[in-house]
Every structure is written in structure tokens, then in C-alpha cells.
């Protein structure tokens, strides 16, 4: 994961996952992506043991650095590196994939690498808003002409960064495209604007393909984005039949692909993202519903370990 020293212990899902593991008797080790190595056939991490506390300003104590052989010394690896989904992330996924049949990696890095959160929903065209992924301006122009109001955002961004609502009459449209194209060689994603976003953007958590629960994130006044760290507020909801239909459609795929902890985003009755990389929301879910998705995740992991070589 990214450095645990700097996390917000009240909201960080990685911290919550680690605390639950510690409560179940696990020995914890922490390392960052740049401390992961493939060394002459060994998958190694330069890591520190750690003890966690839910104590502000004193939430972690580290041991000395050691070199771990992740295929021998470790039972479970959580890949919780935050986006951007760049070559650093992809390389880490490639290296951790080499642990297959040796050490359980959550979420399965092969499929995390192959299923970026804004691309994997394309497998379900009936569940998502009209979507275009392209770098071709003529195609984007035609998409805008059809839908009038559209959302433009980076294909591999996260946390609401770089998300723009472009109205049909917006004179900044061409400048925005130029900004996207000058800052990256990647395509961008355009989606038909969903007016239901004014009522919030639901985060639904699935554990091993099954619904754990969900909550709503309502945008601040004057904002299109509902992400909590850009001013959105969380609130309790009851999942609708449409929400459950979406989860039923994608759940078997997530379970088959080894995606134990997933957060999906739903606006109205449309699926907008499937977050596999480092999904968040377990603390908000517990606050509003009492549902402990972290405990459910570790239950699923322990079940998988029981059927693996290490659990036998």
C-alpha cells in the first residue's frame, strides 16, 4: 500500500483491513510498491513488521526492515496501492501475479491489471450510461452533439480528479480536450450526463461477488462530483431493485476473477465504475448500516485459504 503513516485512521479502508487482520491474530508487514522486487525468481518485499492502534498520532509502530519471500513467508498479500493506474501499478500487478498458486493476493492482480475501473463496466453495456472511450476529437464531437451535456474525465484517474461536466453550450469544451491531450497520450472517457447525480452517487460494496451493503454520496452545492474528499457527504440509503440487479449481473464475474473487495458506483439506475484497485467505503458503510464489510472480506479470505495449499 501507500505509506500507512499518513492515512486517516477514521476513514482509510486499508487501515481498517489491517486492523481486522491484527485482531484475528495475524502478523502484519507493510511495504510500498517501490519496495517490491523480482529477484532471480523470488518475489521479494523489503518490509517492516507493524503493530497498529486506533490512536490518532500514534497509530503504527514498525519493526526493523527485513526481506520477505512472498511465496514462502506470507499467507496473504493485499494489493492496496492507490491509483493512478500507471506502469508502476501494472508492473506491481505483473510481479504479484507470479505468486499465483503460492500466496493469495487480494484482489487477484491478473484481473486488477486487466480490468481498470472505467473499462470493465464496458462488459455490461445495458447497465451503464452511453459511454465513449476515445482520443479522436471527431468521435468526441459527435458524441457531444448526440448527448448535449456530457462528462469528460481521465480514463485512469481516481477520486474525482479531472472530472468535468461540459454543457452543450460550454465554450471551454475545445480547451478542455486540448488540456487532456497535452497532459497525456491516453484516451479520455466521455459519458452522457446523468441528471440523477444531483441525488447522489451510490457506493455499493461487494465481498467475493456478494452484496455487503451501500451508502450514498451526495455532492456539495454547486458540485457535480460526489467524492467524499472533494466535499461530498455520505448518507444512509436502501438499495433499490435496480442496484441489486446490477450486483447480481456482475457478482459472479467478480468472484470468478478473485476480486474479494470491490466498490461499485451507481448513479440513478446506471453503473458508472467498478473499483478493483483500492476501493474505499468500509468505514462509512459500517457507520450508516452497521455492516462490517472488513470482517466479511476476511471471512472470505479465510475460506479461500482453507482450500489452498497453505490452508491444507
Image: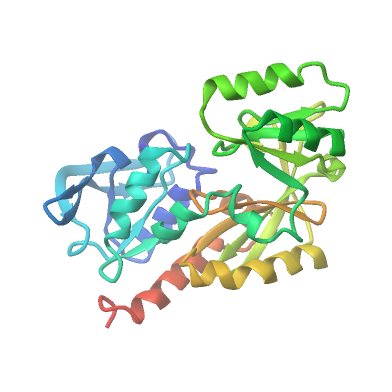
Q: Quadrant of residue 87?
A: top left
Quarter holding the C terminus is: bottom left
Task: Decide which of 218, 148 is in the foreground and name it.
Answer: 148
Q: Residue at x 83, y 20 (%)?
A: 170
Furthest toward the left, the residue is 40
Asked whether the viewer can see residue 119, the reply is yes
Q: Quadrant of residue 251?
A: bottom right
Task: Decide which of 58, 237 is in the foreground and name it.
Answer: 237
- Percent across and percent down for residue 196 are 85, 45
Does 269 sit left or right of 64 as displayed? right
Asked whether the viewer can see residue 2, the reply is no
Q: Residue at x 41, y 44 (%)?
A: 81
Q: Residue at x 83, y 43 (%)?
A: 194
Furthest toward the front, the residue is 138
- Percent across and percent down for residue 276 are 52, 54
Seen in the picture, residue 15 relative to 142 is either above or below; the reply is below
- Percent across and percent down for residue 20 are 42, 59
Give the tally of numbered discs.
0
Seen in the picture, residue 204 relative to 60 is either above or below; the reply is below
Colour scheme: rainbow
- Percent across and percent down for residue 233 are 72, 39
Quarter holding the N terminus is: top left
Q: Quadrant of residue 162?
A: top right
Amino acid at each position: 500500500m501507500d505509506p500507512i503513516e499518513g492515512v486517516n485512521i477514521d476513514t482509510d479502508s486499508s487501515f481498517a483491513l489491517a486492523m481486522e487482520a491484527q485482531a484475528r491474530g495475524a502478523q502484519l508487514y507493510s511495504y510500498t510498491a517501490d519496495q517490491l522486487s523480482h529477484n532471480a525468481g523470488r518475489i521479494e518485499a523489503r518490509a517492516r513488521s507493524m503493530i497498529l492502534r486506533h490512536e490518532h498520532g500514534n497509530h503504527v509502530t514498525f519493526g526493523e526492515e527485513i526481506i520477505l519471500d512472498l511465496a514462502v513467508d506470507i499467507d496473504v498479500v493485499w494489493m492496496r496501492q492507490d491509483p493512478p493506474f500507471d506502469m508502476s501499478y501494472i508492473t506491481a500487478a505483473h510481479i504479484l501475479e507470479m505468486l499465483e498458486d503460492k500466496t493469495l493476493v487480494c484482489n487477484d492482480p491478473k484481473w486488477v491489471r486487466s480490468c481498470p475501473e472505467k473499462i470493465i463496466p464496458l462488459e455490461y453495456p445495458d447497465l451503464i450510461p452511453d459511454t465513449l472511450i476515445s482520443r479522436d476529437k471527431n468521435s468526441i464531437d459527435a458524441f457531444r452533439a448526440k448527448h448535449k451535456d456530457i462528462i469528460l474525465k481521465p480514463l485512469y484517474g481516481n477520486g474525482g480528479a479531472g472530472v468535468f461536466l461540459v454543457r452543450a453550450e460550454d465554450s471551454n469544451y475545445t480547451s478542455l480536450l486540448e488540456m487532456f491531450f497535452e497532459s497525456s497520450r491516453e484516451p479520455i472517457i466521455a459519458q452522457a450526463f446523468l441528471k440523477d447525480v444531483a441525488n447522489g452517487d451510490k457506493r455499493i460494496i461487494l465481498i467475493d461477488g456478494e452484496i455487503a451493503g451501500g451508502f450514498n454520496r451526495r455532492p456539495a452545492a454547486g458540485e457535480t462530483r460526489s467524492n467524499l474528499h472533494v466535499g461530498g457527504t455520505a448518507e444512509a440509503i436502501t438499495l433499490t431493485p435496480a442496484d441489486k440487479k446490477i450486483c447480481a449481473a456482475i457478482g459472479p464475474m467478480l468472484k470468478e476473477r478473485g476480486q474479494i473487495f470491490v466498490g461499485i458506483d451507481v448513479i440513478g439506475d446506471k453503473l458508472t465504475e467498478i473499483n478493483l484497485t483500492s476501493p474505499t467505503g468500509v468505514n462509512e458503510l459500517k457507520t450508516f448500516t452497521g455492516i462490517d464489510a472488513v470482517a466479511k472480506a476476511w471471512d472470505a479470505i479465510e475460506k479461500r485459504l482453507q482450500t489452498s495449499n497453505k490452508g491444507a
